[in-house]
């Protein structure tokens, strides 16, 4: 790995068990990246501040919102004689691209608050390792280019091909792809640009988070320093 155009990444893990009445209410786990840049400490600090703030926000939400909810449900379950299942809050980051002066990642935030299954929300970020700036999707395309229309065309074409083989989307998936397109829901991979949709956006829960990869050969270029 070229240290002049990529970062050295390590993971920092935080775990905590929140209890009440000598019973576990909430299990928390966070794994966040720590970035080291030999060529740009300013960019390094900017990126690390972003990751820290994101993880800290998840921690505070778990403590201030999920933990009180768990205690309330525990009390109600105890009074009614129903079993109580501890809540879970898990945030895990995945580094997807770390080269050519660009760093891209996503994090899946999982919450279980009782019921049949938990929910997962994905968010992502792409940084310039030269400046530490978080890039917008529009930054990856020429100015005034209709990137939204271009990407939606690629996504719908891929979705049509998938549906010919396997019915994994809702019947009105084409409309939902357009309606639920989020320009912040992207990240880079070595093969191309990935656009993703959250659970239930275009498909049932069982289909999970849906990803569409647009190859750099289709985009016409890939990130460069």
Image (cartoon, rainbow, N blue to C red):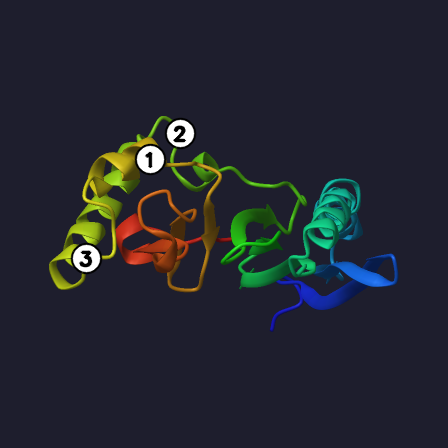
> In the image, 79: left or right of 114?
right
Residue occupying the point 11% across, 58% down: 164
Residue at mark 2: 143
Q: Nearer the viewer, mark 1 or mark 2?
A: 1
Q: Which residue is mark 1?
A: 147
Q: Relative to the observer, which residue lies in front, 48 or 178?
A: 178
Pointer 3 residue = 167
Q: Secondary structure at mark 3?
A: loop
Which tag, 1 or 3, sits closer to the chain's start? Answer: 1
Please say if 59 is above or below 148. Answer: below
- Image marks 2 and 3: residues in contact by CB distance under 8 Å: no
Percent position (x, y) of residue 38?
A: 76, 62
Residue 172 location, quadrant:
top left
> Residue 41 location, x and y as percent?
79, 52
In this view, which residue lies farthest toward the right? 22
Q: Choose between 123 and 2: the one closer to the eye.
A: 123
Pick out the residue farthest to the top. Answer: 144
Q: Is any part of residue 199 visible from this angle?
A: yes
Provide the secondary structure element on which disc 1 rests: helix
Whole-number angstrom distance, CA of label 1 to CA of label 2: 10 Å
- Expressed as whole percent of the image width and height from the top left, the position of residue 140 reads 44, 42
Q: Between marks 2 and 3, how big is the CA–CA gap?
A: 37 Å
Left or right, 77 with reference to 157: right
Dot 2: element: loop
How crowded pointer 2 is (Cα within 10 Å; few <14, some 14-19, many 20+) is rated as few
Select label 2 or label 3 by which is in front: 3
Q: Nearer the viewer, mark 1 or mark 3?
A: 3
Rendered-image quadrant of the N terminus: bottom right
Instruction: List the single residue furthest toward the bottom.
Output: 1
Q: In terms of image quadrants, where is residue 99?
A: bottom right
Pointer 1 with pointer 3, Cβ within 8 A: no
């Amino acid at each position: 790995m070229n240290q002049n155009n990529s970062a050295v990444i390590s993971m920092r893990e935080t775990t905590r068990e929140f209890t009440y009445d000598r019973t576990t209410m909430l299990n928390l786990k966070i794994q966040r990246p720590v970035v080291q840049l030999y060529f740009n400490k300013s960019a390094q600090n900017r990126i690390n501040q972003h990751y820290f703030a994101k993880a800290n926000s998840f921690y505070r939400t778990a403590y201030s919102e999920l933990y009180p909810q768990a205690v309330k449900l525990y009390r109600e379950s105890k009074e009614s004689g129903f079993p109580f299942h501890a809540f879970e809050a898990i945030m895990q980051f995945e580094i997807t691209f770390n080269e050519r002066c660009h760093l891209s990642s996503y994090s899946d935030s999982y919450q279980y608050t009782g019921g049949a299954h938990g929910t997962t929300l994905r968010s992502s970020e792409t940084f310039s390792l030269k400046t530490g700036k978080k890039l917008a999707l529009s930054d990856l395309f020429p100015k005034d280019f209709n990137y939204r229309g271009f990407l939606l065309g690629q996504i719908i074409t891929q979705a049509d091909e998938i549906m010919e083989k396997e019915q994994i989307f809702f019947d009105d998936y084409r409309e939902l792809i357009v309606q639920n397109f989020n320009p912040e829901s992207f990240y880079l991979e070595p093969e191309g640009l990935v656009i993703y949709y959250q659970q239930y956006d275009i498909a049932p829960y069982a289909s999970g988070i849906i990803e569409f990869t647009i190859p750099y050969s289709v985009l016409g270029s890939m990130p460069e320093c």
